[in-house]
């Protein structure tokens, strides 16, 4: 019963599928290119944003001043616990620098010895100059 119903539906739909597959030979028919339509991007206007029209050069005080963290930024950084851990680490670092014999992480650079001694440098210069002349 089921197979007979399927066969009947297939026979009825076969001419319709054949019609879809046929191509038109009408010379007046044209095919248009695909057109993608997108809406214009909306400009986000922040009414609470303040832009100072006066540009002031930084001073000694402004270089040392650090604006306190806002509650929003505090929440984005994980809350009060990571901030307090960071402050505690800074205090431990300040205390560790007072320990006698403490060396700063930034050490002065020391120059390495030249790769060639005087005889080797003179020979290299002589060979280099000899290669320039024909």
Image: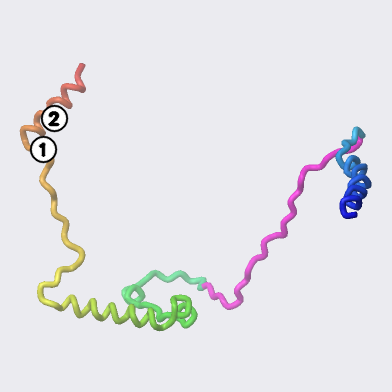
Q: Where residue 14 appears, x then y in whole percent?
A: 90, 43
Residue 92 relative to residue 8: left or right: left
Residue receiving disc 2: 124
Spatial separation of the CA atoms under disc 2 and disc 1: 9 Å
Q: Where residue 5 appears, x then y in whole percent?
A: 91, 52
Q: Where residue 123 appears, x then y in whole percent?
A: 10, 28
The label shown at residue 116 is 1
Q: Where residue 62 appears, x then y in whole percent?
A: 36, 75
The numbered mark, 2 or 1, whose residue comes first in the sequence reads: 1
Q: Secondary structure at mark 1?
A: loop
Does residue 56 belong to the magenta stretch? no
State the extent of the magenta-drawn residues as a range: 28-51
Residue located at (90% from left, 33% from top): 25
Q: Secondary structure at mark 2?
A: helix
Q: Who is closer to the viewer here, 108 or 34?
A: 34
Residue 101 versus residue 22 in the image, above or below? below
Q: Are marks 2 and 1 in contact (CB under 8 Å)?
A: yes
Q: Who is closer to the viewer here, 77 or 113?
A: 77
Q: Quadrant of the N terminus?
A: bottom right
């Amino acid at each position: 019963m089921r197979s007979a119903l399927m066969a009947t539906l297939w026979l009825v739909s076969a001419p319709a599928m054949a019609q879809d597959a046929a191509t038109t030979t009408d010379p007046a028919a044209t095919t248009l290119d695909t057109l993608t339509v997108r809406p214009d991007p909306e400009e986000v206007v922040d009414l609470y944003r303040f832009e100072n029209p006066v540009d002031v050069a930084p001073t000694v005080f402004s270089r040392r001043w650090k604006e306190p963290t806002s509650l929003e930024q505090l929440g984005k950084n994980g809350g009060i616990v990571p901030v307090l851990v960071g402050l505690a680490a800074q205090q431990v670092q300040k205390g560790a620098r007072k320990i006698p014999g403490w060396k700063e992480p930034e050490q002065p650079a020391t120059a390495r010895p030249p790769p060639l001694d005087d005889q080797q440098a003179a020979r290299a210069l002589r060979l280099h100059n000899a290669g320039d002349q024909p």
